[in-house]
Image: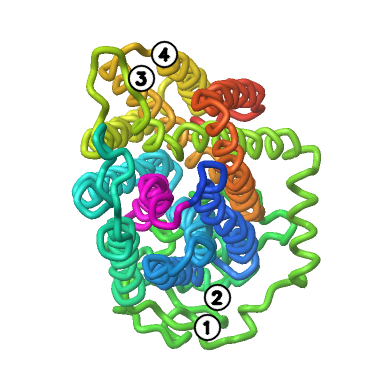
Amino acid sequence: MANISYNSCSVQTVAIILPRVQDHFDVSDKWIGSVSSALFTGMMFGAFFWGSYSDSHGRKIPFTSTLAITTVFGLLSSLAFSFWSLCLALFCLGFGVGGNMPTDGALYLEFLPKEYHYLLTFMSVFFSFGAVLASVLGYAILPYASCPEPTATDPHPACDVSTQNTGWRIMLASAALTTLAMVFVRSFWLRLPETPKFLLSHDRRKETVVVLQNIARINGQDVHIDSSDIPRIERSDSNSMDDDVVLSMAQDDSLRPRRPSNEADIDDDGMDPRAPMLGGQASITDESTTETIYGVTEEKNTKWKLLFGPRWRRTTILVWGIWAFTSVAFTMFNVFLPKYLEILGFQGEAAPTRKDVYWDYMIYSLAGVPGSVLASFMIETRLGRKGTMALSSFGSSVALVIFMIIKSRTMMLLSSSAVSFLVTLLYAVIYGYTPEVFDTSVRGTAVGTASGLSRVAGIISPIVCGILFSIKPSFPLYVSFVGFGIVGVCVILLPYETRGARQD
């Protein structure tokens, strides 16, 4: 969950420091969006790579590896010596960040019984916490560790960027050090095993037994099972195995202690029966159990055929469209908002200082927190997942219209906060709906590709936004308005509502 906060914190940090990076390297409005584009490019490649990797090789390795990558390149980005070296470091940082969502989301969902799947949506509250953290850091650091502000008497004050404009470096380093702490937690304390659903879908039955035994022990039950207790399913039918069928085996009283069969029982596999699942899990010594039925290439082709087959084609296209257009719409508004606030002025009101700007941005970020919390409640009402997404996407368009016609700073703050609230609510549901609607066999690929496509949109949007912004500052807002409208239409056309439905 802390990792989710870091994902959001990284994206928000880059948006917040854009004006200061522009001052530091003397970059034009047209090209300053390249910083965000570099981050999103890395996130795109990370989402595609780690999403496919997690479907073929499991969720466990990406669980820690992605954070290690973000830590290393987060620190390197804070030491960038040129504009393009910063972009390169952020690209590599994004490769780690982009892999977190598809792998962690799938891992978390596959360990949850169905009645707790709403918690995946609730987890998005940590996205908001990450954005708030970045905003608080920006408010506390940037007004005091940046170049002097222009004044009426001195519109172009002198600045020694190497000593006076260090705030953006401090912010990037702070985020990286936070992630380093998460790496240690995941490596030495929260050592999660592979998910039983993934293991079973790859016919790794003995490893499935080990994980189920550990889950039962964590839940205070002494369950003894072996491979013969697990329903044998064909590889092509593995996507029909319900999450609860697997997880409930670890809680089934009918599987209490009994005589071991000819197949090796848990204790015979070299597992310490007292070892907890979190922090000292059992090791698997039979290497033959790790082999899969199909080759990697054939397996990947099968996943794409399934996604574009009769059952999933419409859902796949619409879900990917929702991710892409939400990214376009939100990026167009969010990335340049700090810069937009700096040039925003209202008749009869004093020009905002940097401290005013970062205070307003902090309020904007705080407004997203209740959106994440409310989403986990709304998806279980009659609105369901689809209704909640449609309401939040169309509502975002309305809030943008209000933002475009504002006449005071108060209305600006209220309308931008409404956008933050509604977009956070939208992302919260998208984040939970996407892995929930797809089968285990294609979940990592589907979610990873959806996330990757949103990064493609995120790559293009900052550059296009910079060009539009240099022509007329309000042009990006028009694109954002249309984008949220398209998202709403895609949601309405989705064929599946997952509230109360059995997950296959």
Q: Residue at 80% of width from left, 43% of height from top? A: 309
Across and down, in percent, residue 279 comes to 31, 75
Viewer-proximal residue among 7 and 311? 7
**Figure check: 69 above or below 354:** below
How far is disc 4 from disc 3 in space, using C-alphas? 6 Å
How far is disc 4 from disc 1 in space, using C-alphas? 66 Å
Based on the picture, tell me whether residue 301 belongs to the magenta stretch: no
Q: Along the polypeptide, which appears first: circle 3 or circle 1?
A: 1
Across and down, in percent, residue 325 comes to 60, 33
Based on the picture, tell me whether residue 15 belongs to the magenta stretch: yes
Q: Are marks 1 and 2 in contact (CB under 8 Å)?
A: yes
Q: Along the polypeptide, which appears first: circle 4 or circle 3?
A: 4
Residue linked to disc 2? 206
**Figure check: 370 above or below 144:** above
Mark toward the viewer: 1 or 2: 2
Q: Along the polypeptide, which appears first: circle 4 or circle 1?
A: 1
Q: Please tell me whether mark 1 sits on a helix, a strand or a loop.
A: loop
How far is disc 3 from disc 2 in space, using C-alphas? 55 Å
Q: Which range is magenta?
A: 1-26
Q: Please tell me whether mark 2 sits on a helix, a strand or a loop.
A: helix
Mark toward the viewer: 4 or 1: 4
Residue linked to disc 4? 402
Q: Amino acid at mark 2?
A: Lys
> Does any portion of residue 135 appear in the rendered image?
yes
Tell me if 32 is positioned left or right of 9 in this view.
right
Residue linked to disc 3? 415
Q: Residues within 10 Å of mark 2 (few under 14, many from 20)?
A: many
